[in-house]
Image (tube, rainbow, N blue to C red):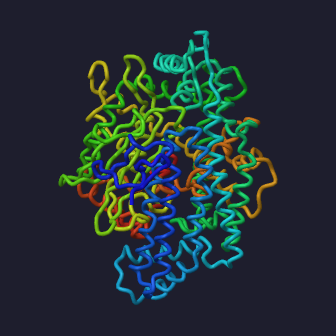
Amino acid sequence: MLAACNSNKVNPLLVDSPLPYGAPQFDKIKFEHYKPAFEQSIAEAKAEIDAIVNNPEAPTFHNTVEAMEFAGMRYNDVASVFYNLMEADTNDKMQALAEEISPMTTELSMYITLNDGLFQRVKAVYEQRESLDLEQDQKMLLDETYKSFVRNGANLSDEDKEVLRGYAERLSLLSLQYGKNVLDATNSFTMLLTDEADLAGLPEFVREQGAAAAKEKGQEGWLFDLSQPSYAPFMKYSTRRDLKEKLYRAYSTKGLAPESDNTGVIKEIVDLRLKKARLLGYETYADYVISDHMAKSTDNVNDFMIKLIDPSLPVAIKEVAELNEYAKANGFEGDTLMPWDFSYWAEKLRVEKYDLSDEELKPYFELESCIQAVFWLANKLYGLTFEERKDIPVYHPDVKVFDVKDADGSHLALFYADFFPRESKRGGAWMTEFRNQRVLDGVEQRPFISIVTNFTKPAGDTPALITHDEFITFLHEFGHSLQGITAVGRYPSMTGTSVDHDFVELFSQINENWGYESEFLNTFAKHYQTGEPISQELIDKIKKAKNYLSAYYQMRQLHFGLIDLAWHNVTEVPAESVIEVEQKAIAPYSVMPVVDGCCMSTSFTHIFNGGYSAGYYSYKWSEVLAADGYSLFEEKGIFDPETAASFRRIMSTGGAVDPVELYRQFRGHDPEPEALLRQLGIVSE
């Protein structure tokens, strides 16, 4: 049957794409296609679930568990396109539609997870698991499917299931509202400068960027906003404390203004998450989440964080004290550095200590060269090749798409790259997928992987140049991409990045390490104007500066984890204000003055609009894995084919094997926090 939209034309979201590999038809997808696509794909998904429930045959792994795994594939593909574009290229109409369809998508989720007939069939198979002749991935799928039902309320009474359904519907809407408020707050602030004196301290590339931003909006002067490519350089180089304070306060109060207020949203999200956890038998929401991660328990997470905080905090205090002394000796007239002073003085001290600046390095990191370098690294380690495909449509002119092939020439994935900021894109950098890897009806479908960043756009005759820090971010997100690109397996819920949160970041963070290696940097880092290769002297400086303020930045990340737990490791919703809750959580571990009226929680999208609630600690958990894991590459050689092949095996396996066992297979032992502390130079060898 033809899939139709309101205009009686074929809906490109509801038919098999004729494009190479079945790529999304971004050139044909229109706004009016989304709602009919959701309605039809949800109806199809429910029909597929009903067919499993009403199957007259006795429940088996194949007719129940496996059939359920592949139910709703059309819906998943529709949702992947829509929600990924909600992050990367949204507009008011899409945001309004997201709120309209949220009850529909939540209802589908509840239709599956609270479906007693479906659960009873799964339970019947689960109870026979010891006598079934299942392969490893099938055993894991059965275990995870059963556990997912239980964790989502399958054992609750009918009355409690209805209560849980209400929580889920409301949480879905609140998450959307939270994200919309953050985006609105980010886009609502701009700082237009018309007096050149206001540009004091800014290098030429920052001025050019500000001028280009103003011109783009039809204004005269230099425009700065809260996007990272605009905000971070201004804070780092400007000598105008008053303007930096203005920018800092705007950045640090996102989600607090009446028109984009997230304080009430946060309290309601925390309340509903806690009620959900209690209904499911857990004391806190953190207990509920972490029990399904590598860490296993909140106590283990707390112990882990203390093992990092105890040695890091005193070193961080010394680092900040040294920075204060340096600033006062070099013209700073205040009593102590404030947060809006930090980047400027940290950069000045870094330049003095290591004779190294971003402005000096950026000419060697032309984005196009960096893209080819990252592809080269994937080829060197894993045999992958990337070929740009101009015949495959993209969702925005800035986006490029590449055909990824394995060493034997077989197709592995399509890789979409979206590098530049725009008002329709949220801030930050991330990896996602428009389709995950799977084997459907005996035919393997390879994934569509996407990387999204907010790097500085080309300005005038100057190509896109990125900082070394941004290059590390690129490597990080590309590490996630590699996990999706190399994914193997039958079941989409267990392939690619579908692994525990405190395991998934291993693959991104270990990839960062090559960004400091001479053998890699020498292959591509050349001055974009002269073609002169980066000198060994500059590379040595990059390496020496790697651990500059490492304890301070470690504590900063741990602060985020503490804020996360302050909201989710509670037995009742905190009575204090959002700002008070946050300050109470980090006050004992703060190394910089706290600014009244500023708040991280109201724009902390990772935990209130993303998948890291009660799991932000996982970045540090995975950093430990990455530090310990990369030491094997250092021991064997950073391009050692045997080590790379071994790492690819655990990277591509996905969730089919317990991550603790996977890591042991690669490294031969369990990791310890000391590996990270040594790598950061916080403790000695």
Q: Locate residue 44, reporting x and y percent.
A: 47, 65
Q: In the image, is 506 to the left or to the right of 561? A: left
The residue lying toward the viewer, choosing from 469 and 40, is 40
Q: Residue at x 68, y 25 (%)?
A: 246
**Residue sticking out furthest to the left:** 408
The residue lying toward the viewer, choosing from 68 and 1, is 1
Q: Locate residue 330, reporting x and y percent.
A: 60, 19
Q: Residue at x 50, y 36 (%)?
A: 548
Q: Is residue 92 above or below residue 267?
A: above
Does any portion of residue 433 appear in the rendered image? yes
Q: Is residue 534 above or below residue 674?
A: above
Q: Residue at x 51, y 62 (%)?
A: 42
**Residue sticking out furthest to the right:** 575
Q: In the image, is 283 to the left or to the right of 123? A: right
Q: Is residue 30 above or below residue 66?
A: above
Q: Locate residue 517, reporting x and y percent.
A: 33, 40
The residue lying toward the viewer, choosing from 414 and 500, is 414
